[in-house]
Image: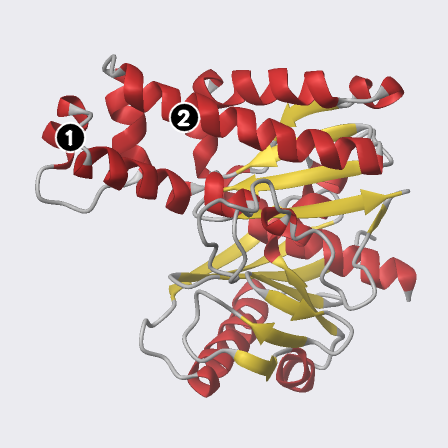
Amino acid sequence: MTRLVLAADFGGTHLRAAIVDERGEVLFREDHPTPPQASPGEAVQLVVDLLARTVEASGAAPAAACIATAGLINANEGKVIFAPNIAGFRNVVLTTPVAQRLGIPAYIENDASAAALGEYRFGAGRGTRHLLHATLGTGIGGGIVIDGRLYRGAQGLAGEIGHIIIDPAGPRCTCGSRGCLEALVSGVAFAARARKLLEQGKSAVLKELVGYAEPTAVHLFEAAKRGDRTCEAEIRNGGHILGLGLGSLVNVLNPDAVTLSGGLLAMGEMLLGPMREAMGSMAYGPASGALVRIGELGENTGLLGAAAVAFERLEGD
């Protein structure tokens, strides 16, 4: 009889819960918006209630639950140390109330690390043993699978690839350092570049697209698609920088493959072409054989990542 798990994807704007089987099939799913002004206590109660409702409505008997969420996570203690997208979420234990309510083991994992294990188990990483995963969105996250197991590090913080330093004299990152990969190549970073181009009066196309709105990475890409060479150069340079960061990690980790997910993939070869070239120029010896693959889990990345973690924990127990 196939085992089932209860998976949750907890974000700043949404909370999703699902019953997932060992093949990665989502058998039942519930969605709920995350209230923007919810206190930490209210947010925890929302998670617990939605998970309980999902179990009740589905009629399933999951063997374990796992919650994937952004931020610094102490997986061993079931604690969110800091969640950047959820106001006031610091040192909040999330697994204990879930386990007490449902009567099953409950786990928590950083969403990017969970995505890595999800792609390894159910998606583009199938067939590998060693995998590096990068999430390319508003920020840059990552996860590492070594010999078929998610690598968490001493304090459970492994995989924060967005905070490797590329340029010590570069822009200030939200973490406080300068020149982090995330500060140079991310949705936020591209929006900052678009803002600077507008301030310098270097892109009439971008100015027309943005109007009186706040510039975004989407505006930058749309201007590039319309033939604005300056905007295209910004995206291509971002791809090159991303390739330098990922290429360095490939040399350290020697993975079978590098998988990618996130909204910036919409930029296609304008971003990914220079990224591959930079990775290829940096790869050392056999590491040059690491394949770059686009993630396959789509909008269910968070849910299937959480499910993969739950199954791994059950197998480890």
Instruction: State the image quarter where residue 212 is shown.
Output: top left
Look at discs 1 and 2 and give the one toward the viewer. 1
Residue 157, percent from left and from top: 71, 62
Residue 196, percent from left and from top: 26, 39
Tell me: 73 left or right of 169.
Answer: right
**Mark number for residue 262?**
none
| Mark 2 residue type | Ile
Q: Is mark 2 on a helix, strand or loop?
A: helix
Indicate which disc, 1 or 2, sits on the residue closer to the N terminus: 1
C-alpha separation, residue under disc 1 versus residue under disc 2:
18 Å
Tell me: 182 left or right of 143.
Answer: left
Task: Please tell me which residue is depicted at 55% across the width and 61% down the height of the picture.
Answer: 70
Vertical arrangement, residue 300 with respect to residue 245, above or below = below
Residue 171, percent from left and from top: 44, 48
**Mark number for residue 201?**
1
Q: 65 and 111: which one is in front? A: 111
Q: How many labels does the image show?
A: 2
Q: 27 and 233: which one is in front? A: 233
Q: Dot 1: within a 10 Å radius of its alpha carbon, few (fewer than 14), some, or many (20 or more) residues?
A: few
Vertical arrangement, residue 249 with respect to residue 162, above or below = above
Q: What element carries label 1?
A: loop
**Mark number for residue 235?**
2
Task: Please tell me which residue is depicted at 72% across the width and 82% down the height of the picture.
Answer: 103
Residue 194, percent from left and from top: 28, 36
Tell me: 32 left or right of 73.
Answer: left
Q: Do the residues labelled 1 and 2 touch (CB within 8 Å)?
A: no
| Mark 1 residue type | Gly
Does residue 125 show up? no
Name of the residue lying farthest toward the front: 169
Task: Please tell me which residue is depicted at 54% across the width and 57% down the height of the picture.
Answer: 177
